[in-house]
């Protein structure tokens, strides 16, 4: 509903309005997965404000507060929540009460919230620095959100092999694209400034061509 964790795309207000208009003509159940959570620079929103009787909103805390938590909170109608609770209580997907209490404490802890805000700012700085380094090598990409950058390539396979030969691991974009444009996902989460030039040069070679802005991503 705000930032897609794989591509970094965010849903604009115009897109929100278009979705609402389309869904008004149906009885479709709406499931919103806020995967990036509090690390997103985009404000949270939900179609539940318009369709409260059929919107299930899930906000994850795993990326912002720690992957070991594996915890998310959902909001929906009382009936939907009851059915989900009944299903989880009789399966292997139960959620630890200790982890729930831990997240509840973190959400109310001022020092933790300051750390989350600082992390959000640092990730943005790392994205900006990587994009600037890529632009210097002819790869000009839009500023997006998230913990990775999507780089259009002529061939995902060629790009991954080329980068692997230089000791760089990236993810293919195959699972996250609908159009014909191929791309790779490059993490900026642990990016160090001394790596920028080396990475930008290798990524430019792996792209196989000068990247251009594409709406296919």
Image (cartoon, grey):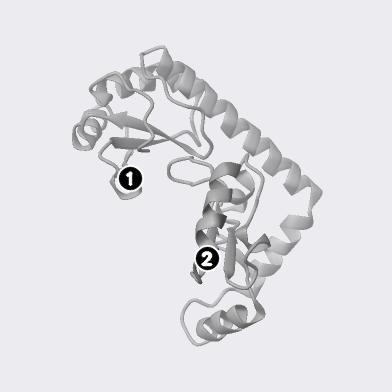
Residue toward you, 81 or 184: 81
Q: Which residue is mark 2?
A: 30
Q: Nearer the viewer, residue 196 or 140?
A: 140
Q: Secondary structure at mark 2?
A: strand
The C terminus sits in image quarter: top left
Question: For the point 68% across and 61% down, which residue is it?
Answer: 49
Q: Earlier in the sequence, mark 1 or mark 2?
A: 2
Closest to the observer, 161 or 48: 48
Dividing the picture into quarters, in which one does residue 13 lie? top right
Residue 68 lies in what quarter of the image? bottom right
Residue 196, image x, y percentages: 44, 20
Q: Which residue is mark 1?
A: 177
| Residue lying at 72% horizontally and 63% vertically, measured from the top left | 104
Q: Residue at x 70, y 39 (%)?
A: 117
- Disc 2 crowd, CA 10 A, few/some/many (<14, 14-19, 20+): some
> Decide: marks 1, 2 in contact (CB < 8 A)?
no
Residue 135: image x %, image y %?
Answer: 42, 16
Image location (x, y in percent) of residue 17: 58, 49
Whether residue 204 sits left or right of residue 51 in the image: it is left
Give 67 or 206, whichever is nearer the viewer.
206
Q: Residues within 10 Å of mark 1 (few under 14, many from 20)?
A: some
Q: Residue furthest top?
A: 136
* Spot occupied by residue 63 in the image (x, y as percentages of width and height): 55, 50
Label 1 vs label 2: CA separation? 21 Å
Q: Image point 55% across, 56% down: which residue?
A: 21
Residue 67 seen in this snapshot: no
Q: Which residue occupies the extreme front position in the image?
A: 25
Secondary structure of residue under mark 1: loop
Q: Is residue 75 visible?
A: yes
- 35 displayed left or right of 110: left
């Amino acid at each position: 509903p705000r930032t897609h964790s794989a591509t970094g795309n965010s849903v604009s207000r115009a897109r929100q309005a278009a979705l609402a208009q389309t869904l008004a003509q149906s009885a479709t159940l709406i499931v919103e997965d806020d995967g990036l959570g509090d690390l997103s620079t985009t404000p949270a929103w939900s179609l539940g404000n318009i369709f409260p009787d059929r919107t299930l909103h899930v906000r994850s805390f795993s990326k912002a507060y720690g992957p070991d938590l594996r915890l998310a909170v959902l909001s929906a109608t009382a009936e939907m929540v009851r059915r989900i609770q009944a299903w989880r209580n009789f399966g292997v997907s139960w959620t630890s009460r200790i982890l729930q209490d831990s997240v509840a404490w973190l959400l109310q802890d001022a020092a933790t919230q300051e750390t989350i805000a600082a992390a959000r700012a640092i990730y943005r700085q790392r994205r900006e620095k990587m994009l600037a380094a890529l632009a210097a090598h002819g790869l000009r990409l839009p500023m997006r959100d998230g913990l990775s950058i999507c780089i259009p390539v002529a061939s995902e396979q060629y790009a991954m092999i080329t980068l692997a030969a230089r000791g760089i691991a990236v993810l293919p974009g195959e699972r996250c694209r609908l159009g014909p444009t191929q791309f790779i996902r490059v993490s900026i989460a642990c990016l160090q400034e001394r790596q920028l030039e080396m990475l930008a040069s290798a990524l430019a070679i792996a792209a196989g061509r000068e990247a251009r802005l594409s709406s296919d991503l």
